[in-house]
Amino acid sequence: MTMDRPLLPLVPPAGERLAPFPFYADRRRRHPVAYDGGEGIWAVYRYAEVRRVLADSDTFSSNRGLTNRPRLAFPDRVPDLVNSDGARHRQLRDPIARFFTPASVARLEPRVSELVHRLLDRVVPTGRLDVVRDLADPLPLTLSIELLGIPPEDRERFLGWWSRWLVWRNERPPYRRNIARRRPGPWAEELDVYLRRLATQRVLEPRGDVLSTLVAMEVGGERLREEEILDGCALFLVAGHVPVTYLISSTVLTLLEHPEVLRRLRAEPAALPAAIEEVVRYRSPVQAVSRVPRRDTELAGAVIREGEEVIAWIGSANRDEARFDEPDRFDVDRHPNPHLGFGVGSHFCFGAPLARLQARTALTALLERLDNLERVEGEPLQASHNPFLYGTVRLPVRFTLAGGGRPAPPNRP
Ligand code: HEM
């Protein structure tokens, strides 16, 4: 156990981002609570500590503003919803979370199915598909943009701005807060102006979308400020998009690596939800989140001072041998499966039902329509360069059509 402050890299090496599990195992065994003096930041890797950091929001605040690390003149604004605690957090969260109750998500099922089949229709005749580019990326992005309330005629333009925003945002690793990003280009101004105008329209003419909810929201008796509304939009789009992309592509990748499970799921589609849940554990799309202690606190023998940020490695907790039997085995029959892939406690992911629906619909369609699925050789996998997320940025596969070469009838609503 470390009572001192060993100066350690807290993040898996860049070349191991798709296989960070031996790194995590070593940290769990030798440095379950580690400190990086250069960044002035801690990390925990074992299930017990990760769960405690996430669940004990009295001690471990989500308000990164409490951190005592230096901030720059051009800081990232962290949206309030993921950055607040207690009553304020609930007032921000509850109105948006209402979009994702089981009943609301069930109403989205026909639209998700329509989108999946439309995306597949474009590529299926070619016998090849890049799971990320052609399906796993556009599906959640389109859905998120629709739920936010971007009108259909503006979506193309909006996607252009948004893809630039994502590139700009990914230029710096999330834990390196004291390194500046370069200033974004003129597109950022255009996006800003566009969203401000749309937000004003929604004040005058509310619709049943997320943006209308954000502009009408009252927190502590006050409406959100314009910046807070824009931050809310960005959070909603990021949170609802990238992890779902990686969940879908990691599920395909994992099934390609486990052909016996792929065969079983074709014969027994009812096992698909359990398989997807096991992917959330086995290749957790969100690998890490951070918290800031409000007071000096002991964690597994180490004393963490108030204001010293802590990274909780969900991806490591979900492979902890102290919590899961044979954690490195992909086991569709794992039951119970108490993974932390969607978080735990007051910040638990309210988008989980929608993420599950999209993954289930996408995988069902792939299994129904495609046979002999295999990776295209010579196409190495490339990891997300954000170490807090796990996924491959491309996954080219080839296949034959199910039903002996004829396109199977799409299962449209
Ligand atoms: C596989 C897909 C997904 C994964 C793995 C995932 C994972 C997570 C995790 C780990 C957290 C907890 C963050 C923390 O404790 O600080 C979280 C929170 C959140 N997720 Fe997800 N998420 C997914 C999909 C979605 C979707 C589809 C949406 C929206 C439609 C969404 C919206 C959110 C929001 C807004 C929060 C913040 C909630 C709060 O702070 O109260 N997520 N997610």
Image (cartoon, rainbow, N blue to C red):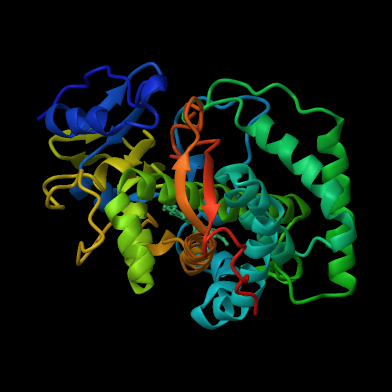
> Farthest residue toward the bottom?
103
Q: Where is residue 85 in the image (x, y as percent from the top left)?
A: 46, 58
Q: Can residue 213 be seen in this view?
A: yes
Viewed as shown, does residue 191 lie left or right of 3? right
Viewed as shown, does residue 325 lie left or right of 205? left
Residue at image x 36%, y 25%?
A: 16
Viewed as shown, does residue 241 lie left or right of 188? left
> In which quadrant will I find the N terminus?
top left
Q: Quadrant of residue 14?
A: top left
Residue at image x 52%, y 77%?
A: 101
Viewed as shown, does residue 309 lie left or right of 327? right
Q: In which quarter of the image is residue 240?
A: bottom right
Residue at image x 30%, y 63%?
A: 264
Q: Where is residue 279 in the image (x, y as percent from the top left)?
A: 35, 53
> In which quadrant will I find the C terminus?
bottom right
Residue at image x 52%, y 61%?
A: 404
Q: Nearer the viewer, residue 330 or 353?
A: 330
Q: Position of residue 105 (x, y in %)?
A: 56, 75
Q: Nearer the viewer, residue 244 or 132?
A: 132
Q: Which of 362 and 47 is in front in this view?
A: 362
Picture layout, residue 369 above or below residue 166: below
Q: Quadrant of residue 67?
A: top left
Q: Is residue 62 visible?
A: no
Picture layout, residue 35 above or below residue 86: above
> Farthest residue toward the front?
404
Q: Position of residue 283 (x, y in %)?
A: 35, 45
Numbered-mark total: 0
Picture layout, residue 166 above or below residue 201: above
